[in-house]
Amino acid sequence: MSEATSEPTVETHRFQTEAKQLLKLMIHSLYSNREIFLRELISNASDAIDKLRFKALENPELLGDDADYHIDITFDKEAKTLTITDNGIGMTHDEVITNLGTIAKSGTAEFLSHLTGDQAKDAQLIGQFGVGFYSAFMVADEVEVATLAAGSDQGVLWRSAGEDAYDMEKIERSARGTSVTLHLKDDALDFAEDFRLRSVVRRYSDHIGVPVRMLEQLPETTDEAEDAEVKEPGFEAVNSAQALWTRPRTEVSDEEYTEFYKHVSHDFEDPLSWSHNKVEGKLEYNSLLYLPKRAPFDLYQRDIPRGLKLYVQRVFIMDDAEQFLPLYLRFVKGVIDSNDLPLNVSREILQEDDRVTSIKNALTKRVLNMLDTMAKKEPEKYQAFWDEFGEVLKEGAGEDFANREALAKLLRFASTKGEGSKKTVSLDRYLERKSEDQDVIYYICSETYETASRSPHLEMFKDRDVEVLLMFDRIDEWLMSSLTQYGDVQFVDVMRGDVTLPGEAKDADDNEETNDEEDEKHPLVERISAVLGDKVDKVRPSKRLTQSPACLVLSEDAMGVQMRKILEASGQSMPESKPIFEFNPNHLLLQRLDMEPDEDRFAELVGILFDQASLAEGGALTDPGAYVERLNRLLLELLDSDK
């Protein structure tokens, strides 16, 4: 560690309150396998070297006289210190504050809100958050970071005990790069031993593409050689220092693939699956793609930078090359290394290059093939994936027309023949078990599984044992506005228009006009219409209800409750949409209502039925107070009649 200047100016900064909570939790609770701190620090050092390689393409002067990239690990057991040094890009004063002074840039509060108090479960959350550097405090009472940015002449020293603050000061440092020095805790002194460190490096960081070096171990001097010249130990590489994605698949073990995933993703869990491929021909590139087990907290923030690590001819170009996969596959991690793209590739060139488009199309199909294979061969594993990332795949089914058929095969939905929201069915399986005379796919959209599964609109389908897909994700109504059919089978929303059961479609078409005339003749139609007025488009007897007294039906082109609420929450004004009020003429309530002579009481009861029908579909009452007053008056009448 370089010494500070003769008159150092020490700055003390406080960690944010939420960051302080998280840091304390990490140090004292979350991690059970402490040795992963070394993997994280080596990964950070490797990233710093990769970034310098890229910047040096345009500015070779940044390298100076040191073009031999390496990461060095040294230790002093007596002083209880361990130091990891790289000769990468280094950091400026402001970059130190950004990278080390803030525990992630967003999502801290959301992370803390997910904690359960169960250490085993909470430990799994840390990989979704990405706070690798701070794992150093698991084994250290204090951490010092001395750094000099490439091209700068002023070094910076960062120091913290991992409690509530950190200090910074300017230092003189001759070599660019960063040194992280850990002042080890008494119960972590095994990390100041050569054999222990070498085994951890070989286990977790063998795939790093630069040498991870330690001082070579020389044999002890014998009595006969006391007068001989003592040889000073030099540095030797501990890892293989070969980029894993460039090696043949047959030579890479599952453990190596797993550890490389943790390196590129900064996830603390193993990946769910991966695909390693080398493409030769018109385009030449290597790809290594991973599917995570768990979704990160910011998965639905579509503007967050994310993508694959891009290398061109083994030279690192950028961390988040988003151009190689569509946005709905933003959860995929991995590496793409191309021999065909120019070394000075920039984001603008990437967006316009035909070769990038070709690679993107190929990688997209590869990921979808991975998922399709998993769904067929490991359905339980795919269900676990779907529970985490299903909503994001639905984005693709609505956006990516070229791959819509492949994506539709991957969709999963709860249904009336399932048991709970997590028991899902594919569209292929739905079609396999439908009746022969059923030529459409029935579905219903609602805000929750409970609202969907108990909707009055399902009653005639349940009575006839006709399966209906239950859709309750916030994206479902938008999805179904673009996904109108699967193969040559149409989707039918059971909440809209005149829905017919299998085998009844032809008769319904032939007798449509006759049925409408009969509906208008029912004595309750005119009376209810007079009460509801312009609240509804029309009033009619229902053919879909068998148990409930009434329901609200959407017209074919009306916006559903789910989509309307989302758009209203975003501040958009919605056009007025009037539902159709359907009543069940066979229900005892409606039969009693038909005999009610008092028009005021009749209107009161119709108002209650209308509000109940709206609530049953997850809608919001326009006047909740009026509904409560009506209900209270009805209850008082019932109580008075019992006296």
Image (cartoon, rainbow, N blue to C red):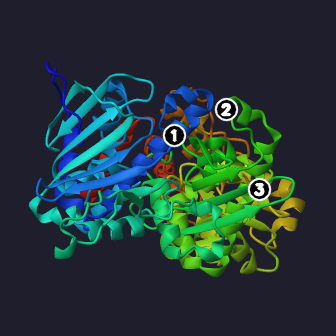
Label annotation for residue 67: 1
Label annotation for residue 151: none
Q: Report which residue position mark 2 lands on.
A: 346
Measured in 3D between alpha carbons, the distance from the residue under mark 1 to the one under mark 2, in whole angstroms, is 23 Å
Looking at the rendering, in which quadrant would you find the C terminus?
A: bottom left
Name the one closer to the observer, 638 or 270.
270
Determine whether 144 is above or below 420 in the image. above
For badge 1, the amino acid type reads Ala
Residue under the point 79% across and 73% down: 438
Q: Is label 1 in a helix, a strand or a loop?
A: loop
Q: Is residue 357 left or right of residue 496?
A: right
Residue under the point 45% across and 41% down: 48
Residue under the point 57% across and 72% down: 382
For badge 2, the amino acid type reads Ser
Determine whether 565 is above or below 415 in the image. above
Residue 547 visible within the image: no
Label annotation for residue 362: 3
Q: Nearer the viewer, mark 3 or mark 1?
A: 1
**Mark 1 and mark 2 residues within 8 Å of each other at the beta carbon:** no
Name the one closer to the observer, 622 or 529.
622
Measured in 3D between alpha carbons, the distance from the residue under mark 2 to the one under mark 3, in whole angstroms, is 21 Å
Q: Is label 3 in a helix, a strand or a loop?
A: helix
For badge 3, the amino acid type reads Ala
Measured in 3D between alpha carbons, the distance from the residue under mark 3 to the one under mark 1, in whole angstroms, is 35 Å
Q: Nearer the viewer, mark 1 or mark 2?
A: 1
Q: Position of residue 172 (x, y in %)?
A: 26, 26
Q: Position of residue 410 (x, y in %)?
A: 67, 65
Q: Position of residue 63 (x, y in %)?
A: 50, 33
